[in-house]
Image (cartoon, rainbow, N blue to C red):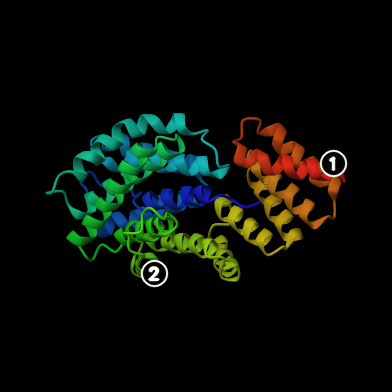
């Protein structure tokens, strides 16, 4: 069993917005270099899963600058990242109040040709998060509208200021994944294949940005997985986990990479680590059960893990429950 393309893209699109989180320590807005330096704090709090600290930090921004987009966007990104820990939507209720205020501000900035490149970049990321939220609520046209406007706004930000390499994260993701999907749709042959250009833009963001560098690195990691470069993924993900050992989204990808490589003992160990970090990430039981079933080594533990997943996730979507039921039925027949 593997994560669906939709699941992988969920994490990637939230990353496309996350790179804009930053903080202000002065009453007046600091210059962009100072904001980028402060942005590292917000980024690392989230990637390290220090969620309570991140929430307090970002709410402090809203309280101090209620008319600025910065804090609203940061909280929107935080709750969508938290959704992705277990690939469900349990934090949508926390997300919506901040989006209700943040999205109109982002639209205003995106539609104003006089907006600064930095503000346009921030607005683009906010709209990308809004698009992701609408997509997982199956509001597809609204999702396409916000996502497209968000990435085009980031692109305009870069055209306005070519030194703003942070913007190349969003631009590169848009170029790569739009090409990836349109190449698979025979009725959309007129879109150029810009996958290599997208990867090049992500490399520029990784190598030339102070803040977006780590997030571009993670984005390239997901692309490598999609392109089945599993050995390369294994090397990169170990390096990233050395910096963010409690990041369960990275550990999920590592576990699935090991599953593709049929390293079943390591798959089980990886998902057991995820459960140690956060016992509420119930989908780890599904992967443990599948790895043991494929290994044909400990069928009782496999069945127990699969049953536990089904018991703890009674409302999981069909794409998650179906492989669990298929594996369990197969084990019980044998």
Indicate left or right for 247 with 330 as reference.
left
Q: Nearer the viewer, residue 189 or 129?
A: 189
Q: How many angstroms separate mark 2 from mark 1 (CA)?
A: 46 Å
Residue neighbourhood size for the residue with mark 2, other residues' Cα within 10 Å, grouped as few (<14), some (14–19), many (≥20): few
Q: Looking at the image, which residue sits at the far left?
A: 114
Q: Please state the horizontal and vertical placement of residue 78, each as a whole percent of the image.
A: 44, 42
Task: Name, please, the residue furthest toward the front.
Answer: 187
Q: Earlier in the sequence, mark 2 or mark 1?
A: 2
- Label 2 belongs to which residue? 196
**Above/below status of 202 relative to 18:** below
Q: Is residue 309 above or below residue 230?
A: above
Looking at the rendered structure, the secondary structure element under dot 1 is: helix
Image coordinates for residue 234, horizontal then vertical, percent: 60, 67
Q: Is residue 308 visible?
A: yes
Drawn side of residue 119 relative to residue 235, left or right: left
Q: Are marks 2 and 1 in contact (CB under 8 Å)?
A: no
When the figure is inspected, residue 161 is found, relative to residue 75, above or below; the finding is: below
Going 50% across and 63% down the picture, which residue do you hit? Answer: 221
* Closer to us: 209 or 312: 312
Residue at the image point whose x is 31% and y is 57% from the top = 36
Quarter of the view holding residue 239: bottom right
Can residue 279 be seen here? The reply is no
Number of numbered labels in the structure image: 2
Residue 172, disc? none
Determine the residue positioned at 75% across, 47% down.
Answer: 289
Residue situated in front as seen by the camera: 101 or 188: 188
Q: Residues within 10 Å of mark 1 (few under 14, many from 20)?
A: few
Q: Is residue 110 left or right of residue 323?
A: left
Find disc 1 in the rendering and name its residue.
Answer: 332
Secondary structure, mark 2, is: helix
* Residue 279 position within the rendered picture, expressed as x and y whole percent measured from the top left: 66, 40
């Amino acid at each position: 069993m593997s994560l669906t393309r939709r699941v992988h893209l969920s994490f990637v699109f939230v990353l496309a917005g996350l790179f804009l989180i930053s903080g202000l320590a002065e009453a007046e807005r600091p210059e962009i270099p100072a904001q980028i330096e402060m942005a590292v704090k917000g980024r690392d709090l989230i990637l390290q899963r220090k969620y309570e600290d991140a929430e307090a930090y970002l709410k402090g921004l809203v309280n101090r600058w209620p008319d600025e987009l910065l804090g609203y966007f940061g909280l929107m990104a935080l709750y969508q990242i938290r959704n992705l820990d277990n690939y469900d939507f349990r934090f949508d209720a926390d997300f919506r109040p901040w989006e209700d205020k943040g999205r109109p501000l982002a639209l205003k900035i995106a539609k104003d040709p006089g907006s600064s490149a930095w503000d346009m970049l921030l607005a683009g990321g906010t709209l990308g998060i809004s698009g992701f939220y609408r997509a997982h609520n199956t509001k597809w046209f609204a999702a396409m509208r916000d996502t497209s406007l968000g990435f085009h706004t980031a692109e305009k930000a870069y055209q306005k200021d070519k030194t703003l390499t942070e913007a190349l994260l969003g631009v590169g993701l848009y170029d790569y994944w739009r090409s990836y999907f349109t190449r698979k749709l025979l009725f959309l042959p007129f879109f150029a294949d810009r996958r290599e250009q997208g990867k090049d833009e992500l490399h520029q963001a990784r190598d030339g940005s102070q803040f977006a560098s780590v997030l571009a690195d993670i984005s390239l990691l997901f692309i490598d997985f999609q392109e089945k470069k599993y050995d390369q993924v294994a090397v990169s993900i170990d390096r990233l986990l050395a910096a963010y050992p409690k990041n369960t989204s990275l550990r999920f990808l590592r576990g699935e990479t090991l599953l593709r490589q049929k390293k079943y003992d390591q798959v089980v160990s990886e998902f057991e680590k995820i459960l140690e970090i956060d016992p509420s990430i119930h989908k780890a039981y599904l992967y443990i059960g599948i790895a043991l079933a494929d290994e044909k080594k400990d069928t009782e533990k496999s069945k127990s893990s699969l049953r536990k997943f089904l018991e703890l996730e009674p409302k999981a979507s069909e794409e998650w429950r179906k492989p669990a039921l298929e594996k369990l039925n197969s084990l019980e027949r044998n």
